[in-house]
Image: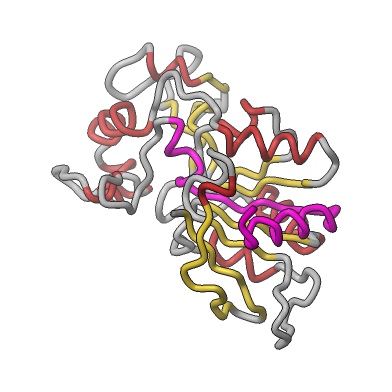
Amino acid sequence: MDQNIKTLQQWIDESQRIVFFGGAGVSTESGIPDFRSVDGLYNQSYAYPPETILSHSFFAQNPEEFYRFYREKMLIRGAKPNPAHLKLAELEQAGKLTAVVTQNIDGLHQAAGSQTVYELHGSTLRNYCMKCKTKYPVDFLWDTTGVPRCPVCGGIVRPDVVLYEEGLDADVLSGAIHAIQQADMLIIGGTSLVVYPAAGLINYYNGPQAGSSSTSPPPAWTAGQTWPSTPPSERFSPKSPWTEAPGRRVPLWTLS
């Protein structure tokens, strides 16, 4: 077995409060495109940049175009959890993992069996009327066209997702911060760590050796986009053994 994998397994064996912090790369093998890769959503051509379409101001001013884009690109039918989701659920069931903190909005962690999931950016599976607050499942958007209207009061039904220019849910944010603060191991995967404030949450990690200048690594692990969809010994390769992050040394291991 690759030494890097032995190290990861050792850290998992020695940890009791693991938290996983993940992003779009976790779900790519489930057929859900990421955002910033070569083939990602943000590198495709539209009349408006996706970042603009998925903003609060655009939603308010151009709801028809917003929902056209949203149905076409953000709603994915038939997506199933991949081995990464399933492994994380397995770790939780084994009493090793205490929480998943995700930037994803696809609900696949819960579909895999994870119970404690903090969805920083909401979920496409949930929708609500902006006027009367009636809740609707994702099928409601599939079964409507144009701007979806609430059958109860006629208000606009919007996705329960966090758009650009909107703040994160305070309760979700508080729960995620608490979980990371209490963690004795933080695994980071499938995220470029460029979307804030979500990416800043990893700075709340205070696990063993956080801030240490020793040569031995603390249990914070940064993986590539699709860990661990195939046997780890076939996937990991060290490219840059260590990289400095605020307050601690973080192993930066990417997938081959």
Residue 197, placed above or below residue 234: below
Horizontal placement of 237 versus 247: left or right? Answer: left
- 166 or 187: nearer the viewer: 187
Residue 10: say if magenta: yes
Residue at 54% of width from left, 77% of height from top?
243
Quadrant location of residue 85?
Answer: top right
Q: Image point 33% across, 53% down: which residue?
A: 36
Given residues 46 and 170, the one toward you in this image is 46
Residue 94 x/y as whole percent: 83, 38
Quarter of the image where the C terminus is located: bottom left
Q: Residue at x 34, y 45 (%)?
A: 54
Q: Is residue 184 left or right of residue 103?
A: right
Q: In which image quadrant can residue 242 be found?
A: bottom right
- Residue 183 appears at what percent x and percent y? 79, 59
| Residue occupying the point 41% across, 56% down | 165
Residue 2, magenta (yes or no): yes
- Where is residue 52 shown, x and y percent of the image? 27, 51
Range drawn in magenta: 1-30
- Give percent across and percent down for residue 155: 43, 24
Q: Residue furthest front?
A: 1
Q: Closer to the camera, 30 or 106?
A: 30
Prevalent SS, magenta region: helix
Residue 117 image-quadrant placement: top right
The colour mode here is secondary structure
